[in-house]
Image (cartoon, rainbow, N blue to C red):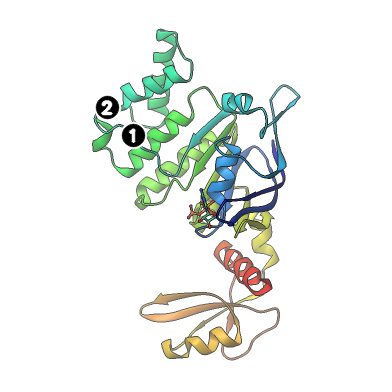
């Protein structure tokens, strides 16, 4: 649906935030994973027509058999786009209903009756109907994000971009929010940027891992996990031995379980030394790619 080719961007301070990014993003949920500074927001802002790229192309199927040049034909993209930025500010003293109505007017829904139907429908869809008359300042983080999705869905977008929406949400709110996104993803392309690996494992049929402006991997989470099968090893180690393991092995992650470090390493061969093989998960894939990238750099 969306095809990104060799997209690059270097900021005035010399940071290369996008380095030849090439990605195909189909309908459904697409997870964009990467650590802080990977370039996720830069990519999303570029796709949302809010900033310019230096080079590359992006085209988006227009739903009528043609395609839109995203970098040039910004108005056409904006008509098909819903965007929830990382820092979505709301007017705290306005009710959810009033603010959504206001956004709907800005989106061009001028017919009052029609606008009301759309706004009411969206408030129900995001489960804020009962809270619609409350001021947004009193909303929890999760409610605010669901309101953010409601405004992003105004105008029936075919491309929805959400930038790190689950940061700071408690597990229940996070689940509720992700389920909502998954429902939306049944009909349109939803790009979800996050540094929470489980968000992608649980929800996204397709994904990419980015670091320092580069795409390190793209594909289906299950395929990426399958490719690591038999190469991830686990061991409980003593805290003071950790630096030694870091030196001798490709350490993927360290987790304290009951106060003791449990490490995962990547090795194509049985490393011996009391390591046991474990079934890899997407977090192992994520760290393996980041370590490989760091080594290559
Ligand atoms: N306007 C800007 N001017 C200069 N450098 C920028 C600008 N915006 C982002 N950067 C830098 O570009 C790099 C990529 O940033 P970006 O915000 O796209 O990453 P990110 O993956 O979204 O990270 P985060 O999770 O921290 O938002 C970082 O090194 C960042 O400091």
Of residues 273 and 250, which is closer to you in this image?
A: 250
Residue at 49% across / 39% down in the picture?
A: 181
Determine if residue 203 is in view.
Answer: no
Residue at 67% across / 69% down in the picture?
A: 229
Determine if residue 234 is in view.
Answer: yes
Q: Position of residue 191 (x, y in %)?
A: 57, 42
Task: Tell whether circle 1 marks a residue whose Cβ is less than 8 angstroms from ligand 1.
Answer: no
Residue that carries the numbered disc 1 in the rendered image? 90
Q: CA distance from mark 2 to mark 1?
A: 8 Å
Q: Position of residue 32 (x, y in %)?
A: 58, 50
Quarter where residue 28 is shown: top right
* Quadrant showing the C terminus: bottom right
Q: Position of residue 99 (x, y in %)?
A: 34, 25
Of residues 87 and 229, which is closer to you in this image?
A: 87
Of residues 66 and 5, which is closer to you in this image?
A: 5
* 217 displayed left or right of 139: right
Residue that carries the numbered disc 2 in the rendered image? 94
Q: Is residue 128 above or below residue 249?
A: above
The numbered mark at residue 256 is none
* 34 displayed left or right of 66: left
Q: Is residue 127 above or below residue 16?
A: above
Of residues 166 and 43, which is closer to you in this image?
A: 43
Callout 2: 10 Å neighbours few (<14), some, many (20+)? some
Callout 1: 10 Å neighbours few (<14), some, many (20+)? some
Quarter where residue 98 is shown: top left
In the rendered structure, are the residues bearing label 2 and label 1 in contact, judged by CB atoms less than 8 Å apart?
yes
- Classify mark 2: helix, strand or loop: loop
């Amino acid at each position: 649906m969306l095809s990104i080719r060799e997209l690059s961007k270097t900021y005035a301070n010399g940071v290369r935030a996008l380095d030849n990014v090439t990605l195909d993003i189909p309908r459904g949920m697409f997870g964009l994973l990467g650590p802080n500074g990977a370039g996720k927001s830069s990519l999303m802002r570029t796709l949302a027509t809010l900033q310019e790229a230096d080079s590359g192309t992006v085209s988006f199927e227009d739903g009528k058999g043609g395609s839109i040049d995203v970098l040039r034909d910004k108005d056409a993209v904006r008509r098909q786009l819903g965007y929830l930025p990382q820092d979505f500010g709301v007017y705290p003293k306005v009710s959810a209903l009033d603010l959504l109505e206001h956004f709907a007017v800005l989106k061009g829904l001028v017919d009052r009756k029609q606008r009301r139907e759309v706004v009411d429908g969206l408030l129900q869809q995001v489960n804020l109907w009962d809270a619609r008359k409350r001021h947004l300042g009193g909303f929890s983080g999760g409610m605010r994000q669901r309101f953010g999705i409601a405004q992003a869905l105004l105008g029936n977008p075919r491309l929805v971009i959400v930038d790190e929406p689950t940061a700071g949400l408690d597990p229940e709110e996070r689940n509720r929010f992700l389920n909502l996104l998954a429902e939306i993803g049944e009909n349109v392309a939803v790009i979800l940027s996050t540094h929470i690996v489980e968000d992608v494992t649980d929800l996204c049929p397709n994904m990419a891992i980015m670091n320092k402006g580069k795409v390190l991997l793209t594909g289906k989470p299950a395929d990426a996990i399958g490719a690591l099968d038999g190469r991830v090893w686990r061991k409980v180690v003593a805290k003071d031995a950790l630096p030694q393991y870091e030196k001798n092995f490709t350490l993927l992650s360290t987790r304290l379980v009951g106060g003791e470090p449990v490490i995962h390493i990547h090795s194509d061969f049985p490393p011996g030394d009391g390591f046991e093989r474990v079934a890899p998960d997407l977090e192992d894939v994520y760290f393996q790619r980041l370590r490989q990238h760091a080594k290559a750099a």
